[in-house]
Image (cartoon, rainbow, N blue to C red):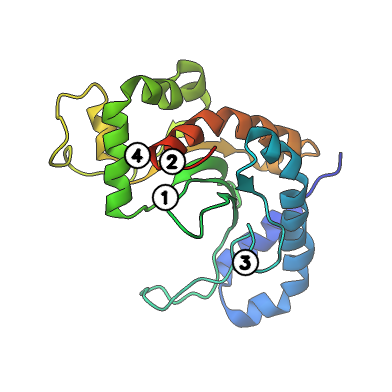
Amino acid sequence: MTAYFSDKTFKFLRGLARHNEREWFHGHKTDYEANLRQPFLRLITDLQPALAGVSTHFRADPKGVGGSLFRIHRDTRFSNDKTPYKSWQGARLYHERARQVAAPSFYLHIKASECFVGGGLWHPETKTQRRIRQFIVDNPGGWERAAHDPTFRKRYTLASSDMLVRVPAGFPADFTRADDLRHRNFVVTRALGDADVTGADLVSVLEKDLAAIAPFMDYLCAALDLEF
């Protein structure tokens, strides 16, 4: 197997974090293409068979624009932070209906010393949050297996940032997993070491993650009446 990323990938990202300006980026655009963007697009292509083995309803799209790879450019229109670039690059392996309805995605995040793989729904609209919470209340056994299986939870963390202070109105405060109803995001993640990301067996590593996260994604799809 061939490695996709290298120490040069993280050197570029660390440099971009220190010099987050257009002049620096354009002066190092060749490094960006050679060591981050193009390898990421190749990785997305090579993940297609593994993803199809998990679900035929998700897409790993290596298209340069509008595919799985997120732009490294930041949207600064509504932000006080006007730095033009992200200091990381991410890709989502998205549901085939993601452009029509809210849907979970698998996700890979590349940032120096902060890489991770995960899956779920990040910042869904309020109505989608409520729909998932109601499904959890109505199907607690499935949620227990999908999100709290002991073997699964040894490797994957249920994201706990940006939670409600209390169980939202209309939901039982004495529910077995009441704290889970406080989530605004329904996401699981696993940290990846830089050595994992630069290793030659990255596809095999991620193939196992896709398979392990699949039951959690299946549950979210069921909550939203999506095929899995």
Residue where numbered disc 1 is placed: 122
Instruction: Please state if 104 lies on the left or on the right of 175 as rendered.
Output: right
Residue where numbered disc 2 is placed: 187
Local secondary structure at mark 2? strand
Instruction: Please state if 118 lies on the left or on the right of 219 as rendered.
Output: right
- Could you tell me how far apart the alpha carbons at marks 4 and 1 are, in whole angstroms? 12 Å
Residue where numbered disc 3 is placed: 66
Mark closer to the chain start, 4 or 1: 1
Q: Nearer the viewer, mark 1 or mark 3?
A: 3
Q: Are marks 3 and 2 in contact (CB under 8 Å)?
A: no
Q: Position of residue 73 (x, y in %)?
A: 56, 71
Q: Nearer the viewer, mark 2 or mark 4?
A: 2
Q: Are marks 1 and 2 in contact (CB under 8 Å)?
A: yes
The 10 Å Cα crowd at callout 4, few under 14, some 14 to 19, many 20 or more, is some
Residue ID at (26%, 44%) = 130
Mark closer to the chain start, 1 or 2: 1
Mark closer to the chain start, 1 or 3: 3
In the depicted structure, whether residue 155 falls above or below residue 87: above
Mark closer to the chain start, 2 or 4: 4
